Amino acid sequence: MSNKAIICQDLTKQFGAFKAVDHISFEVEQGEIFGFLGANGAGKTTAMRMLCGLSFPTSGKATVAGFDVYHQQEKIKANIGYMSQKFSLYENLTVTENIEFYGGVYGLSRTEIKKRGGDMIDMLGLSQSAKKLVGELPLGWKQKLSFSVAIFHRPKIVFLDEPTGGVDPLTRRQFWDLIYSAAADGITVFVTTHYMDEAEYCNRISIMVDGRVEALDTPTQLKHSFQAQTMDEVFYQLARRAQRTAD
Amino acid sequence: MKQLLAFIRKEFHHVFRDKRTLLILFGLPVVQILLFGFALSSEVKNIGIAVLDNAQDNNSRQLTDRLQTNSYFLVKPAIHSYPEIEERFKKGEIKCALVFPADFSADMERSGKAQVQVIADASDPNTATIAVNYISGMVNSYLQQTRPAPHLNYQILPQLRLLYNEEQNGSLNFVPGVIALIFMIVCTALTSVSVVREKEMGTMEVLLVSPFSPIMVLVAKAIPYLVLSIINFILIILLSVYLLDVQVRGNFLLLFGESVLFIITCLALGLLISNLTNSQQTAMLISMMGMMLPTLLFTGFLFPIENMPIPLQVISRIVPSRYYYIIIKAVMLKGLDFSYIWKETLVLACMSVGLLGIALAKFKTRLS
């Protein structure tokens, strides 16, 4: 097994004549926070879905946590966590019930779930609300809970699809604290985002334009090579080249 | 296995937290049984009737008395003239009128033949026919009792026996039908919504990313509803036995087993609908509206299938409740054993396996 968390080589996804993802290649180190940026419709979500085993690539190679995306999807699934764009906890279950369910789905034992779940609730400061329905929690807490649930089974890699959409800056900051502590525990974080301030928090970022990875480096290096002050500028310079319109 | 249990537990949480689901699951059957049992009766009782007695003699009075004691009729105040008959019909006060001619008894004594006129409101042909039959029967029995015909040595008197339902309890016919209808609607509707809900909420995406096999999703979705439907079944049977006096004549275990099989068929159908649709509304519409009419029409408890045109009879063969209706009637009412219903059982079993297979094949494990 290689020590890279994710390896992509010429990964392509084609829908008819449309190349949603066009020969992308990159590597993600273990324990790295990898930002996956791009305008709407650039192909981020499609690429991520292939890596999560939600759809098959049309061509190219990729391994996730050392497993092949064509033949070992089940093994990949057991080793990754995933937080989708849409809020993905059950609103009419309580906090504890959600944790029990997801823990159970990943095959954790009941005692483990109880112990770790308790720790997690304490850490999030949710002990008062453990018996509350998740639907009643404020959005920021839901997102934090959602992330904690996604890494509850201690996956090697966690995929976050625009995890902080619609959340205020303060909560976003707290959310990133969670991401940092997960990365410190050795979990590789693969995150898509629209917020350029968040891009700065990543170890390395890639920017997708029209299905291709147009830039990949540390935020500092990217700003340097594009001679820009902020990541915003880098992003605009690249996004302006896009031929596709967002859908 | 641990995963499956966690999933099943979650589904139960969903069901118990969703009052609407519980209401549909347990409210609907109870309401239907009570409605069909007490309010909607196909038996004809309390037919409004009035008598125009031009004879006013012993015979006519005795016949009128008999009418009064008969539970099928509700005798209204007497009529005094012919024009009044029509008036009373128009008012809707009576459905039936009985007219004795002035020389009723005299005719009977003299020629042995007397006439009595029965007028019935045939805008409701069923009631009219039944009323007329009741009255002829009543007149005949009166004749036989009061003047046994000495000059006739040979008489054929049909001895009627109504098999399987000697007391003519109307509930017997519809209870099996309602049970079939309830399962068909309730099981299908609830399961069909449950998978689609995950798609709508976005939780399906997370399930698909988890190491969960499609068959496990389907099984986990079906099991809570299977358990609840079984409780439901017992509830309906208890209601029928204690409230509507419908006894289970056959083997209860056989009835139970067959019902579980039918429930599984309905759940499989629900899962299939669920996998083919993308919104709860569509799923609900298909399973509630789409299933209701075929079930009502083709189960056979409202309209006899034998009288339908051939194409409709063919269609009725794909409706699962039709087979269950035959089975449940055979076991519950006639007390027959498995050897009489193995064919229907086989059909249901094949349908279940087929539907589950298609549902599984249609389950989209990937997004694209």
Image (tube, coloured by chain):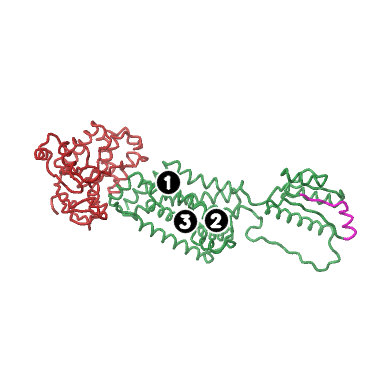
Relative image position of residue B80 (x, y in whole percent): 83, 44
Q: Evaluate if marks 3 and 1 touch, with contact meaning CB atoms under 8 Å apart.
A: no
Find the distance from the CA under tag 3 to the CA under tag 2. Answer: 23 Å
Letter of the chain that mark 3 sits on in the rendering: B
Residue carrying label 3: B260
Tell me which label, 3 or 2, sits earlier in the chain.
Answer: 3
First in residue order: circle 2 vs circle 1: 1
Residue B348 or residue B228, whichever sits in front = B348
Residue positioned 86% across, 66% down in the render: B151
- Whether tag 2 and tag 1 are in contact, CB under 8 A, the answer is no
Mark 3 or 1: the one toward you:
1
Q: Which residues are magenta?
A: B97-111
Label 1 sits on residue: B281
Residue B272, label in figure: none
Query: Which chain hosts label 2?
Result: B
Amino acid type at mark 3? Val
Considering the numbered disc 1 on the image, is that residue within a helix, a strand or a loop? helix
Q: Nearer the viewer, residue A72 or A10?
A: A10
What is the spatial separation of the Cα atoms under label 2 and label 1, in whole angstroms? Answer: 24 Å
Label 2, on which residue? B297
